């Protein structure tokens, strides 16, 4: 063997240290190579993820109470597939914070390890945004704001095993602060972790109004795009496209406001809006507001909105278009019907394009169109106790109308330049 001088050996070790650094801190493993950082386990003290490398979620990564995770503008985070409860997901636990402040020119992108994207300014070309789903988990943010679960005042978030204490959410602090999340695109998530149990693109469990969330995009998630489990956080400028279930979902008496939002239906999408009310007696008065939304269906899409389980809140100044002739606004239970009658659930000033995709005798799209002539034709009180005729009349009286062109809805300029939707040319209809 050739002799190696001490100086040469030292230089070799220094080079190795520069090209590869591995450390383990409180269960969170970070591996850095020239352009890749890998993460797994818990983050228990403040940490920053730099845009200088691609960050890989090896499995479940949880930011624990008292810690802040900062993600620099222009950072790409990729989740590995994982299996079951070990699917890759980033969880911000109660009492922790996420400081992810992208910009219009340098958004933050969460995506799959399978996505060949290398720049936040240029989409990857190997995954079809209309079909790619379920490649990793998603982003879960949990807080101490009030929720209304079936019992008590707290709950375990779906997607996180019951024995993981950091999956608990809810409390009494309406103004709780889980951080600042802006200009963030979340793509191709929703891994199935159990029968009927998938992770949403963005899950907000008991998140308080002290949290800042705006300019959020969710693309191609298996389950819902954005789901609110109680809480009081306000969300502005959100876009969901090609999700497998509902675009925007409300549960457990969410009491915040969603303002300026867009939905683009995929071939297997369900509702544009699915709204549930309180599950228990706690925080039973929580009431949400959704306003200034534009929701685009397709020939297979037959659901505008669905109100269930004591739904209560306001949907106003939204524009629905591109759905098929079976599409409707549904009241699905007696309590939601009662809430609609007494104004606890208010649908006001919404417009629906009168042209719909037509269906054949077997309920399949036939390539043609049909026209609604009466706003009452798209409203359905399916409860056992409601007065359907009176409900139809109230729906029209509250300023909901049929139109032939856009009269209200979202300001699409907030989504130009930083979203995958814009890069794919999908905003031209808005």
Image (cartoon, rainbow, N blue to C red):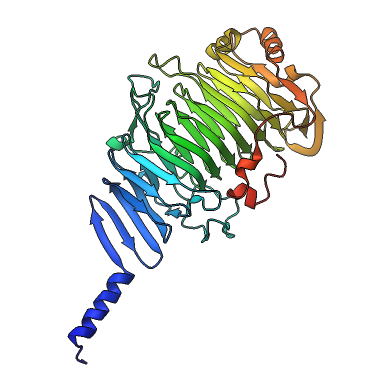
Compared across the picture, whether 344 is left or right of 430 comes to left
Compared across the picture, whether 306 is left or right of 93 comes to right
**Along the viewing direction, whichever of 205 and 132 lies nearer the viewer:** 205
* Residue 267 visible in the snapshot: no
Give the residue at x 45% y 54%. 75
Query: Does 88 sit above or below residue 286?
Result: below
- Quadrant where the image shows the N terminus: bottom left
Query: Does 385 sit above or below residue 219?
Result: above
Q: Residue furthest bottom?
A: 2
Give the residue at x 41% y 61%. 53
The quarter of the displayed image where residue 267 is located: top right
Residue 216 in the image: x percent, y percent?
52, 41
Residue 96 in the image: x percent, y percent?
32, 38
- Quadrant where the image shows the C terminus: top right
Residue 61 in the image: x percent, y percent?
34, 47
Compared across the picture, whether 379 is left or right of 126 comes to right
Give the residue at x 40% y 30%. 210
């Amino acid at each position: 063997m050739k002799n190696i001088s001490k100086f040469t050996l030292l230089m070799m070790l220094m080079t190795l240290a520069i090209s590869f650094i591995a450390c383990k801190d409180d269960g969170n493993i970070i591996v850095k190579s020239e352009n890749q950082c890998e993460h797994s386990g818990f983050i228990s003290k403040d940490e920053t993820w730099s845009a200088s490398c691609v960050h890989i979620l090896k499995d479940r990564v949880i930011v624990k109470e008292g810690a802040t995770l900062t993600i620099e503008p222009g950072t790409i985070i990729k989740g590995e597939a994982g299996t079951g409860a070990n699917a890759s997901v980033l969880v911000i636990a109660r009492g922790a914070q996420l400081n992810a402040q992208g910009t219009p020119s340098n958004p933050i992108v969460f995506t799959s390890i399978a996505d060949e994207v290398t720049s936040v300014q240029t989409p990857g070309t190997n995954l079809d945004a209309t079909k790619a789903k379920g490649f990793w988990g998603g982003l879960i943010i949990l807080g101490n704001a009030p929720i209304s679960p079936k019992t008590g005042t707290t709950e375990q978030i779906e997607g996180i095993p019951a024995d993981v204490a950091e999956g608990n959410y809810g409390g009494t602090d309406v103004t709780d602060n889980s951080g600042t999340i802006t200009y963030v695109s979340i793509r191709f998530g929703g891994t199935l972790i159990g029968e009927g149990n998938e992770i949403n693109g963005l899950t907000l469990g008991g998140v308080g109004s002290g949290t800042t969330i705006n300019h959020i995009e969710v693309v191609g998630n298996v389950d819902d795009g954005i789901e609110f489990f109680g809480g009081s956080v306000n969300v502005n400028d959100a876009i969901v496209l090609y999700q497998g279930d509902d675009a925007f979902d409300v549960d457990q008496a969410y009491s915040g406001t969603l303002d300026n939002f867009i939905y683009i239906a995929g071939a297997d999408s369900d509702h544009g809006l699915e709204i549930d009310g309180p599950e228990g007696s706690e925080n039973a008065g929580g009431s949400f507001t959704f306003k200034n939304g534009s929701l685009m269906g397709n020939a297979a899409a037959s659901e505008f909105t669905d109100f269930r389980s004591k739904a209560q809140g306001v949907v106003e100044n939204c524009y629905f278009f591109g759905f098929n002739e079976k599409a409707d606004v549904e009241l699905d239970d007696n309590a939601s019907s009662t809430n609609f009658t007494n104004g606890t659930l208010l649908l006001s000033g919404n417009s629906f394009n009168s042209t719909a995709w037509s269906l054949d005798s077997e309920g399949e799209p036939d390539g043609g169109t049909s026209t609604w002539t009466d706003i009452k034709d798209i409203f359905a009180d399916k409860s056992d106790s409601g007065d359907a005729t009176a409900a139809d009349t109230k729906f029209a009286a509250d300023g909901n109308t049929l139109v032939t062109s856009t009269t209200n809805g979202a300001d699409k300029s907030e989504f130009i330049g930083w979203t995958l939707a814009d890069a794919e040319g999908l905003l031209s209809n808005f």
